[in-house]
Image: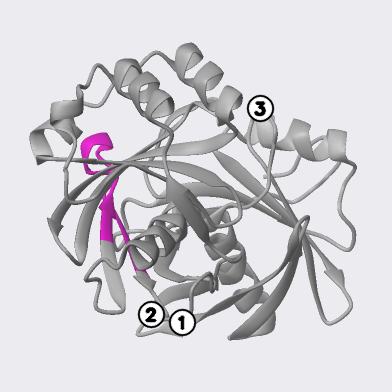
């Protein structure tokens, strides 16, 4: 697809389940970044939760991300999609990316006919969530304190942007997530949140997740690499028995099952490796 200004837009789903699932992202690679207004217009026209824009800079790439509503500091699934595009263009390898807030990297290539990419997130940090924010978020979803899993307390986790982490006691509660989009956007803007990450821990190393992204004009993301990295940093800070890696299943309740895997190093605050496969969206 091309816009009125003949900008080529590629469409991929990141963290896919074979030829299905994953989170769609727009990818625009050019000799220079379009103007900020043009990037915002393109992202709104594409309509996906994020579109990523990349242009050569030194020995790497200058990268910015836009949702249909606003610029986003970091987006994991769009980074994985971008890595796949760069590997198709330049061959498998590690690509250095400069975001607004600093450098990250993405590694991509093909394995047995499947394109896979691994990003290394920005540094992580976390803290316990403010009780008043937790109460407001629970009210937004119609949940109660008794629905929370006491083994994983609510947290505010950062890996390029901020995410509220709410772990629930059972899968059925997670399945009935719903909320008012406008109310969610107001709450998230007031607290600087990029997503609210609702979780159920099937095991200490396997999670089921739903991510509210109202601030980006999207009710729910089917796969969220930035939130996966933030969650992983939070688990490390808590001393959770992650064993060095976790798997996240997301998008099931949307009919777009997606798979994310994170690798969690021991160093406090270090970036998290987030991996998944991608597929091209035709049409």
Query: Which image quarter: residue 56?
Result: bottom right
Marks 2 and 1: in contact by CB < 8 Å? yes
Tag 3 residue = 69
The answer to whether 118 is drawn above or below residue 156 in the figure is below
The image quadrant where one finds the N terminus is: top right
Residue on which the image places disc 2: 113
Judge from the rendering whether residue 36 lies leftward or rightward of residue 249; answer left or right.
Answer: right
State which region is magenta.
Answer: 248-261
Q: Is residue 172 left or right of residue 193?
A: left
Residue appearing at x 83%, y 45% in the figure? 6
User: Between 227 and 85, which is closer to the camera in this rendering?
Assistant: 227
Q: Residue at x 15, y 30 (%)?
A: 147
Coordinates of residue 109 in the picture (x, y in percent): 51, 82
Q: Quadrant of residue 205?
A: bottom left
3 vs 2, front mark: 3
Q: Report if residue 186 lies within the magenta region.
A: no
Disc with the residue nearer the chain's start (3 vs 1): 3
**Marks 3/1: CA–CA distance:** 33 Å
Give the number of marks.
3
Nearer to us: label 3 or label 1: 3
């Amino acid at each position: 697809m091309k816009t009125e200004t003949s900008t080529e837009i590629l469409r991929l789903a990141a963290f896919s389940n074979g030829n299905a699932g994953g989170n769609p992202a727009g990818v625009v690679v050019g000799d220079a970044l379009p103007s900020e207004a043009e990037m915002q217009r393109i992202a709104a026209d594409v309509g996906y939760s994020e579109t990523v824009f990349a242009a050569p800079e030194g020995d790497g790439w200058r990268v910015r991300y836009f949702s249909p509503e606003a610029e986003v500091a970091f987006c994991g699934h769009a980074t994985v999609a971008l890595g796949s595009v760069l590997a198709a263009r330049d061959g498998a390898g590690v690509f250095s990316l400069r975001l607004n807030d600093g450098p990250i990297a993405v590694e991509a290539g093909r394995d047995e006919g499947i394109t896979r990419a691994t990003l290394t997130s920005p540094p992580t940090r976390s803290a316990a969530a403010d009780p008043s924010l937790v109460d407001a978020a629970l009210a937004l979803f119609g949940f109660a304190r008794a629905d929370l899993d006491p083994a994983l307390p609510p947290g505010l986790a950062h890996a390029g942007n901020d995410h509220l982490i709410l772990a629930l006691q059972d899968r059925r509660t997670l399945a009935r997530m719903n909320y008012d989009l406008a109310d969610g956007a107001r709450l998230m803007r007031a607290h600087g949140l990029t997503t609210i990450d609702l979780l159920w821990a099937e095991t200490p190393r396997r999670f089921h997740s739903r991510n509210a992204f109202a601030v980006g004009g999207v009710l729910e993301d089917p796969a969220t690499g930035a939130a996966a990295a933030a969650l992983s940093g939070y688990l490390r800070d808590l001393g959770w028995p992650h064993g060095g890696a976790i798997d996240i299943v997301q998008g099931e309740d949307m009919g777009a099952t997606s798979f994310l895997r994170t690798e969690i190093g021991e160093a406090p605050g270090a970036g998290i490796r987030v991996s998944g496969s991608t597929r091209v969206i035709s049409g």
